[in-house]
Image (spheres, rainbow, N blue to C red):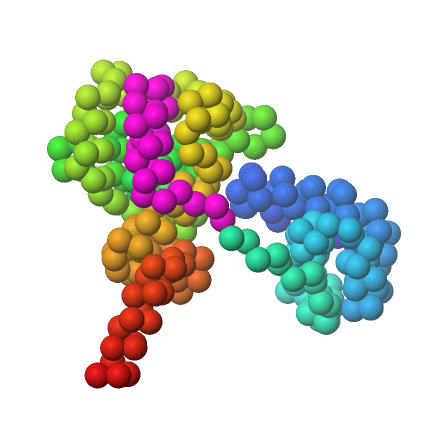
Protein backbone atom coordinates (compact mmCIF):
# COMPACT_ATOMS: atom_id res chain seq x y z
CA UNK A 1 0.00 0.00 0.00
CA UNK A 2 1.28 3.45 -0.91
CA UNK A 3 1.65 6.00 1.87
CA UNK A 4 -0.81 8.26 0.00
CA UNK A 5 -3.41 5.50 0.02
CA UNK A 6 -2.80 4.71 3.65
CA UNK A 7 -3.31 8.36 4.61
CA UNK A 8 -6.53 8.73 2.60
CA UNK A 9 -8.12 5.38 3.40
CA UNK A 10 -7.02 4.64 6.94
CA UNK A 11 -4.97 7.12 8.91
CA UNK A 12 -6.70 10.43 8.23
CA UNK A 13 -10.21 9.02 8.87
CA UNK A 14 -8.93 7.74 12.23
CA UNK A 15 -7.92 11.29 13.24
CA UNK A 16 -11.52 12.39 13.71
CA UNK A 17 -11.28 11.93 17.49
CA UNK A 18 -8.38 14.39 17.80
CA UNK A 19 -8.74 18.07 18.61
CA UNK A 20 -9.34 20.17 15.54
CA UNK A 21 -6.17 22.20 16.07
CA UNK A 22 -4.20 18.92 16.21
CA UNK A 23 -5.80 17.68 12.99
CA UNK A 24 -4.98 20.97 11.28
CA UNK A 25 -1.34 20.60 12.34
CA UNK A 26 -1.19 16.99 11.14
CA UNK A 27 -2.75 17.90 7.80
CA UNK A 28 -0.27 20.75 7.34
CA UNK A 29 2.74 18.51 8.03
CA UNK A 30 1.36 15.88 5.65
CA UNK A 31 0.61 18.36 2.87
CA UNK A 32 3.81 20.40 3.09
CA UNK A 33 6.47 17.85 3.97
CA UNK A 34 5.42 14.20 3.99
CA UNK A 35 3.27 13.74 0.89
CA UNK A 36 5.54 15.56 -1.62
CA UNK A 37 8.57 13.37 -0.79
CA UNK A 38 7.19 10.10 0.58
CA UNK A 39 3.56 9.90 -0.54
CA UNK A 40 4.21 7.72 -3.61
CA UNK A 41 6.35 5.22 -1.71
CA UNK A 42 5.11 1.83 -0.59
CA UNK A 43 4.91 1.44 3.17
CA UNK A 44 7.35 -1.48 3.03
CA UNK A 45 9.94 0.68 1.22
CA UNK A 46 10.15 3.28 3.98
CA UNK A 47 13.53 2.49 5.50
CA UNK A 48 15.42 4.30 8.23
CA UNK A 49 18.05 5.75 5.86
CA UNK A 50 15.37 6.98 3.42
CA UNK A 51 13.43 8.70 6.19
CA UNK A 52 16.63 10.19 7.63
CA UNK A 53 17.53 11.62 4.23
CA UNK A 54 14.06 13.13 3.88
CA UNK A 55 14.16 14.56 7.39
CA UNK A 56 17.59 16.12 6.85
CA UNK A 57 16.28 17.90 3.74
CA UNK A 58 13.74 19.93 5.74
CA UNK A 59 15.45 23.22 6.52
CA UNK A 60 13.38 24.17 9.57
CA UNK A 61 14.19 22.07 12.64
CA UNK A 62 10.74 22.72 14.09
CA UNK A 63 8.97 21.67 10.89
CA UNK A 64 11.21 18.59 10.65
CA UNK A 65 10.34 17.49 14.18
CA UNK A 66 6.63 18.01 13.53
CA UNK A 67 6.73 16.06 10.26
CA UNK A 68 8.73 13.27 11.91
CA UNK A 69 6.22 13.07 14.77
CA UNK A 70 3.28 12.81 12.36
CA UNK A 71 5.01 10.15 10.24
CA UNK A 72 5.87 8.23 13.40
CA UNK A 73 2.22 8.23 14.47
CA UNK A 74 1.21 7.04 11.01
CA UNK A 75 3.66 4.16 10.95
CA UNK A 76 2.89 3.08 14.49
CA UNK A 77 -0.76 2.93 13.54
CA UNK A 78 0.15 0.89 10.46
CA UNK A 79 2.00 -1.59 12.69
CA UNK A 80 -1.06 -1.95 14.92
CA UNK A 81 -3.19 -2.62 11.84
CA UNK A 82 -0.78 -5.29 10.61
CA UNK A 83 0.24 -3.29 7.53
CA UNK A 84 3.87 -3.03 8.69
CA UNK A 85 6.14 -5.29 10.69
CA UNK A 86 7.96 -2.49 12.51
CA UNK A 87 8.04 1.29 12.95
CA UNK A 88 11.31 2.38 11.36
CA UNK A 89 11.09 5.98 12.61
CA UNK A 90 12.74 4.76 15.81
CA UNK A 91 15.94 4.31 13.79
CA UNK A 92 15.91 7.96 12.75
CA UNK A 93 17.46 10.91 14.60
CA UNK A 94 15.16 13.95 14.46
CA UNK A 95 16.53 17.46 15.06
CA UNK A 96 16.91 18.29 18.72
CA UNK A 97 14.38 20.80 20.03
CA UNK A 98 15.84 24.22 20.66
CA UNK A 99 16.09 25.22 24.29
CA UNK A 100 13.02 27.37 24.86
CA UNK A 101 13.34 29.90 27.65
CA UNK A 102 10.06 31.84 27.74
CA UNK A 103 10.14 35.53 28.56
CA UNK A 104 8.21 36.08 31.78
CA UNK A 105 7.07 39.03 33.84
CA UNK A 106 8.33 39.60 37.36
CA UNK A 107 5.99 40.56 40.18
CA UNK A 108 6.55 44.29 39.66
CA UNK A 109 5.72 44.02 35.96
CA UNK A 110 2.59 41.98 36.71
CA UNK A 111 1.44 44.72 39.08
CA UNK A 112 2.09 47.33 36.40
CA UNK A 113 0.20 45.31 33.79
CA UNK A 114 -2.84 44.89 36.03
CA UNK A 115 -2.90 48.60 36.80
CA UNK A 116 -2.56 49.45 33.12
CA UNK A 117 -5.62 47.37 32.17
CA UNK A 118 -7.85 48.89 34.86
CA UNK A 119 -11.16 49.68 33.16
CA UNK A 120 -10.17 48.03 29.88
CA UNK A 121 -12.59 45.63 28.17
CA UNK A 122 -10.05 42.81 28.68
CA UNK A 123 -9.46 43.50 32.37
CA UNK A 124 -11.38 40.47 33.66
CA UNK A 125 -9.61 38.17 31.19
CA UNK A 126 -6.22 39.60 32.16
CA UNK A 127 -6.88 39.29 35.90
CA UNK A 128 -7.67 35.59 35.53
CA UNK A 129 -4.80 35.02 33.09
CA UNK A 130 -2.12 36.45 35.38
CA UNK A 131 -3.60 35.29 38.70
CA UNK A 132 -4.50 31.68 37.91
CA UNK A 133 -1.78 30.30 35.64
CA UNK A 134 -4.31 29.34 32.97
CA UNK A 135 -3.47 27.99 29.55
CA UNK A 136 -4.31 30.47 26.80
CA UNK A 137 -7.35 28.49 25.66
CA UNK A 138 -8.58 28.07 29.25
CA UNK A 139 -8.53 31.81 29.93
CA UNK A 140 -10.31 32.51 26.64
CA UNK A 141 -13.01 29.96 27.44
CA UNK A 142 -13.82 31.26 30.92
CA UNK A 143 -17.39 32.41 31.48
CA UNK A 144 -18.65 34.51 34.36
CA UNK A 145 -20.69 31.56 35.59
CA UNK A 146 -17.41 29.68 36.13
CA UNK A 147 -16.40 32.25 38.76
CA UNK A 148 -17.86 32.03 42.25
CA UNK A 149 -17.14 35.51 43.53
CA UNK A 150 -18.38 34.61 47.01
CA UNK A 151 -15.79 31.89 47.56
CA UNK A 152 -13.21 33.02 45.01
CA UNK A 153 -13.25 29.61 43.34
CA UNK A 154 -12.92 29.25 39.56
CA UNK A 155 -13.89 26.12 37.63
CA UNK A 156 -11.80 25.31 34.58
CA UNK A 157 -13.97 23.12 32.38
CA UNK A 158 -13.45 24.18 28.76
CA UNK A 159 -11.09 25.91 26.37
CA UNK A 160 -11.65 28.22 23.42
CA UNK A 161 -9.39 27.99 20.37
CA UNK A 162 -9.20 29.83 17.06
CA UNK A 163 -8.63 27.27 14.30
CA UNK A 164 -8.70 27.98 10.57
CA UNK A 165 -10.65 31.21 11.07
CA UNK A 166 -13.35 29.96 13.43
CA UNK A 167 -13.91 29.28 17.12
CA UNK A 168 -13.62 25.78 18.55
CA UNK A 169 -14.73 24.82 22.06
CA UNK A 170 -12.49 22.07 23.46
CA UNK A 171 -12.41 19.96 26.60
CA UNK A 172 -9.58 20.50 29.08
CA UNK A 173 -6.25 19.12 27.87
CA UNK A 174 -6.06 16.36 30.50
CA UNK A 175 -8.27 15.07 33.29
CA UNK A 176 -6.24 17.03 35.86
CA UNK A 177 -6.74 20.14 33.74
CA UNK A 178 -10.43 20.01 34.65
CA UNK A 179 -9.89 21.65 38.01
CA UNK A 180 -11.04 24.22 40.54
CA UNK A 181 -8.60 26.96 41.50
CA UNK A 182 -8.82 30.01 43.74
CA UNK A 183 -8.47 33.71 42.98
CA UNK A 184 -6.52 36.05 45.28
CA UNK A 185 -8.68 38.40 47.32
CA UNK A 186 -7.84 41.59 45.39
CA UNK A 187 -8.94 39.86 42.17
CA UNK A 188 -12.25 38.75 43.67
CA UNK A 189 -13.02 42.29 44.86
CA UNK A 190 -12.24 43.84 41.48
CA UNK A 191 -14.14 41.19 39.51
CA UNK A 192 -17.21 41.82 41.66
CA UNK A 193 -17.04 45.47 40.64
CA UNK A 194 -16.83 44.82 36.90
CA UNK A 195 -19.05 41.72 36.59
CA UNK A 196 -21.72 42.35 33.92
CA UNK A 197 -25.36 41.59 34.64
CA UNK A 198 -25.82 39.36 31.61
CA UNK A 199 -22.80 37.11 32.24
CA UNK A 200 -21.26 35.46 29.18
CA UNK A 201 -17.57 35.07 28.47
CA UNK A 202 -14.95 37.15 30.22
CA UNK A 203 -13.78 38.28 26.77
CA UNK A 204 -17.31 39.31 25.81
CA UNK A 205 -18.08 38.98 22.11
CA UNK A 206 -14.42 39.10 21.05
CA UNK A 207 -12.86 36.11 19.33
CA UNK A 208 -9.39 34.80 20.30
CA UNK A 209 -7.67 36.63 17.45
CA UNK A 210 -9.21 39.94 18.48
CA UNK A 211 -8.17 39.36 22.09
CA UNK A 212 -4.56 38.78 21.02
CA UNK A 213 -4.47 41.93 18.90
CA UNK A 214 -6.16 44.21 21.45
CA UNK A 215 -3.99 42.92 24.29
CA UNK A 216 -0.78 43.56 22.33
CA UNK A 217 -1.97 46.92 20.98
CA UNK A 218 -2.93 48.23 24.43
CA UNK A 219 0.38 47.14 25.94
CA UNK A 220 2.26 49.00 23.21
CA UNK A 221 0.13 52.14 23.34
CA UNK A 222 0.36 52.39 27.15
CA UNK A 223 4.02 51.34 27.34
CA UNK A 224 3.11 48.35 29.51
CA UNK A 225 5.29 45.26 30.00
CA UNK A 226 4.34 42.71 27.37
CA UNK A 227 4.75 38.98 26.93
CA UNK A 228 2.74 36.69 24.62
CA UNK A 229 -0.51 35.49 26.18
CA UNK A 230 0.80 31.97 26.79
CA UNK A 231 3.66 33.45 28.83
CA UNK A 232 1.24 34.96 31.34
CA UNK A 233 0.87 31.38 32.60
CA UNK A 234 4.65 31.04 32.83
CA UNK A 235 4.81 34.37 34.65
CA UNK A 236 2.35 33.29 37.34
CA UNK A 237 4.10 29.97 37.87
CA UNK A 238 7.57 31.53 38.05
CA UNK A 239 6.57 34.28 40.46
CA UNK A 240 4.55 31.88 42.63
CA UNK A 241 7.51 29.52 42.94
CA UNK A 242 9.82 32.47 43.57
CA UNK A 243 7.53 33.64 46.37
CA UNK A 244 7.90 30.26 48.06
CA UNK A 245 4.73 28.45 46.99
CA UNK A 246 5.32 24.69 47.07
CA UNK A 247 5.97 23.17 43.65
CA UNK A 248 3.24 20.56 44.24
CA UNK A 249 0.67 23.31 44.81
CA UNK A 250 1.78 25.19 41.69
CA UNK A 251 1.62 21.96 39.69
CA UNK A 252 -1.94 21.31 40.82
CA UNK A 253 -3.00 24.87 39.99
CA UNK A 254 -1.47 24.59 36.52
CA UNK A 255 -3.29 21.32 35.87
CA UNK A 256 -0.10 19.38 35.22
CA UNK A 257 -0.19 15.59 35.26
CA UNK A 258 3.20 15.45 36.96
CA UNK A 259 5.19 17.63 39.35
CA UNK A 260 8.21 16.80 37.18
CA UNK A 261 6.67 18.82 34.34
CA UNK A 262 6.30 21.85 36.60
CA UNK A 263 9.85 21.54 37.90
CA UNK A 264 11.31 21.09 34.43
CA UNK A 265 9.66 24.05 32.74
CA UNK A 266 8.93 26.52 35.53
CA UNK A 267 11.39 26.05 38.38
CA UNK A 268 14.00 28.69 37.51
CA UNK A 269 15.62 30.09 40.68
CA UNK A 270 16.80 33.67 40.13
CA UNK A 271 20.27 34.86 41.06
CA UNK A 272 19.23 36.14 44.48
CA UNK A 273 17.70 32.79 45.42
CA UNK A 274 20.86 31.01 44.27
CA UNK A 275 23.00 33.49 46.20
CA UNK A 276 20.99 32.83 49.37
CA UNK A 277 21.40 29.09 48.80
CA UNK A 278 25.18 29.54 48.64
CA UNK A 279 25.16 31.63 51.82
CA UNK A 280 23.27 28.84 53.59
CA UNK A 281 25.70 26.22 52.29
CA UNK A 282 28.71 28.37 53.21
CA UNK A 283 27.36 28.87 56.72
CA UNK A 284 27.04 25.11 57.16
CA UNK A 285 30.57 24.62 55.84
CA UNK A 286 32.47 27.05 58.06
CA UNK A 287 30.55 27.03 61.32
Q: Is residue 107 magenta?
A: yes
Residue, far left: 150
Residue 158 shows in the view: no
- The percent coordinates of residue 272 (x first, y second) are 34, 59
Q: Quadrant of the N terminus?
A: bottom right
Q: Position of residue 27 (x, y in %)?
A: 68, 42
Residue placed farthest to the top in the image?
Answer: 197
Instruction: Tell me the residue at 29%/76% (across/down).
Output: 281
Image quarter of the C terminus = bottom left
266 over 233 or under it: above or below: below
Which residue lies at the image location 41% right of the left edge and 29% below the top edge?
Answer: 224
Tell me if 248 is positioned left or right of 268 in this view: left
x and y percentages locating residue 82 in the rendered image: 69, 66
Which quadrant of the structure image shows residue 199?
A: top left
Q: Residue at x 68, y 69 (%)?
A: 90
Which region is colored magenta?
102-128
Amino acid sequence: MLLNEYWDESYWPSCGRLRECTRVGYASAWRRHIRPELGDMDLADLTGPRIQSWLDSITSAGAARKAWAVLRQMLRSAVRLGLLDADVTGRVTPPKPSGYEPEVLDIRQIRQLLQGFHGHELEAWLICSVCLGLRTEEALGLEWQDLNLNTGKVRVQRGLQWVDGHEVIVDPKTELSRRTIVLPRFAVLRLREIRPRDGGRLIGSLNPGQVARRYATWCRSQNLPYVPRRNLRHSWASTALGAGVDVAVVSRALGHSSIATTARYYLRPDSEVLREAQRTWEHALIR
